[in-house]
Image (cartoon, rainbow, N blue to C red):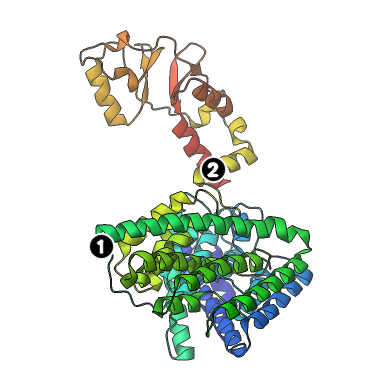
Amino acid sequence: MKIKGVLDIFRRPEGVLSYTRRWVLLAFLVGLCCGVGMIGFYLAISGLQLLFAGVPVYLSMIVGGVVAALFIRFRKRHTDGTGIPYYIKCRKGAGDIKLSDVGSHFVTSATAIGSGCIAGREGPAVFMGGGIALWLARLLRFPKEKRNLTLTIGGAAATSAIFQSPLGGSIFAAEIPYKHDLDAPEYMPSFLASLTSYFTFRFGIFCLTGSYPHLLKLNISSSLNSPLQLLYSFIVGIVTGLVGVLFVYTFHFARQRFAKLFRPEFAVLVGIGITAIGSFITLHLIKGDIPFGGTGFHILNYIESGPHISIEFLSVILVGTILASSLTVGMGVSGGVFGPSLVVGGCVGGIIGLIVDPENVSAYVVIGMSASHAASTKTPIASMILILEMSGFPPIFIAMAIANIAAFFVSGSKSLYFGQISDRLEELVNKIGDMDILSLLRVKDIMDKNSVSLEENQTVSAVRQLFTDSGKQSLPIVSNDNVLRGVITLNDVENKGDRTMVRHILKKEPVVVTPDTSIKDALALLFDQETKGIAVVDNQSRFLGFLTIKDVITSCRQYVSDD
């Protein structure tokens, strides 16, 4: 009864906790639960890796493929692929992630990664974090229209824990849904959840194992600050971006074309079978004990620490990782693409480093890792912060930034994450189209009724000052009895003398709308006239207000978020 009473207090929209404090509570609880969940995920993967330590990777990965196939055959719901497309779909309101889905993804992903399948951890982490956050939000009866914020908090918390990167993880969750944007308004709650999950995970792992987790064990002392080294970093970015395009096309071909030839569970088995054969051939081509398989961090540490690394070795690992991850995750094995994309970029950076600057190969490996993930997932800021945090903030920030920017633009708009859209404006337009808001709303609902107006006898000098003070680009001209006389724009007063009178340059027959005009028709007029603002008048031409494209976007965004 006491626990129920406390939960009832938290559930009240206007209880002892304010709205903002309730989100702080949710962020803290999500961070705590995701931290604990990722401890279990990490230990499950580590335990399976120890279990299969003496088994060749081309045999052990078959176990992961069989488990994935069985879950797809009998469980079906959200047990295949990276999990991030489902996460993005859920943000769009077209799906849901239940706690049972989190459990299924936990088992299939941990088994796949732990048995040596070429897959990353970020996809399962984001999916499971989103599911945990939605479960807690439902438990505390948080508003359903805020599910995007809830999902972002969960994705950030889980990513921050599993990669030990609270700053990068929170930015990553905000960047995932978009190719050229991020959820800036949702960043601070997710950062709180990220910090909570980070410390929970770190403390829990230390208590259970006696040591802190280290994914990347790098030793980089060079700063790469010379103009020539920055040029080499730019080249790494360009080449990595092009290789990223190849990676994305290969992954999509496996997912959308090759996998369609088989039933989903058989597609997984076919993909794993081909990957196992390829791994067997690769490991026999490369002599020695190579830690090939899994998330890729073992091979990255091996590449970074080995002076014996050659261009031929890196080329084989590069091609093998692209094909293997496409045939595993791309064909339906549960896992992410973060680790494989880092291996691809690390190999590219290592190859270029061996050619142009052999003394600093390790630095170019790390730069290539960041650039590759930026190119293949469209998360340029998060990619850089994640790698910097995971590698102990080596002094290569400028070089890494140059490579990331180059890779991001060279790679275009293709991404390994299905379902990403361009930006928040596209998301808004899609929602507006689905809800047909433009036909429902009227000009009177959103017009600026307190718009600044001018008189005909004012000078251009005064008008310029008014444009500057108001921030407007179009202003109405009215008579003494408030009848609209015309409209003047910022372009109209350019190159005009300061003493020129407004009446000499105003547009005498401006396009106008009435208060009852639909926003859809008003926007058509705005675009047809190639103007950003339009005057609103009554049937006697009296000025009532002004409507701009910015007003339409702002109001529609508010309408969608409040619905």
**Lateral position of residue 82 relative to residue 409, left or right:** right
Answer left or right for 311 relative to 393.
Answer: right
Give the image location of residue 5, x and y in percent: 56, 72
Q: Mark 2: which amino acid?
A: Glu
Q: Secondary structure at mark 1?
A: loop
Residue tagged by mark 1? 225
Residue 139: mark in rendering: none
Give above or below for 28 relative to 443.
below
Residue 49 in the image: above or below residue 319: below
Report whether 447 appears left or right of 113: left
Q: Is residue 19 visible to us here?
A: no
For marks 1 and 2, the one nearer the N-term is 1
Which of these two is toward me, 281 or 324? 281
Q: Position of residue 191 (x, y in %)?
A: 42, 64
**Whether residue 244 is visible:** yes
Q: CA distance from mark 1 to mark 2?
A: 39 Å
Q: Is residue 271 left or right of residue 187?
A: right
Which residue occupies 38% across, 11% down? Answer: 481
- The residue lying toward the viewer, choosing from 437 and 118, is 118
- Between disc 1 and disc 2, the foreground one is 1
Which amino acid, by three-letter code, is at mark 1? Answer: Asn
Element on which disc 2 rests: helix
Picture quarter with the N terminus: bottom right
User: In the rendered picture of this protein, how many numbered marks are placed on residues?
Assistant: 2
Q: Residue at x 28, y 71 (%)?
A: 222
Q: Residue at x 59, y 83 (%)?
A: 44
The dot on residue 426 is: 2
Local crowd size for mark 1, using a 10 Å CA cut-off: few (<14), some (14–19), many (≥20): some
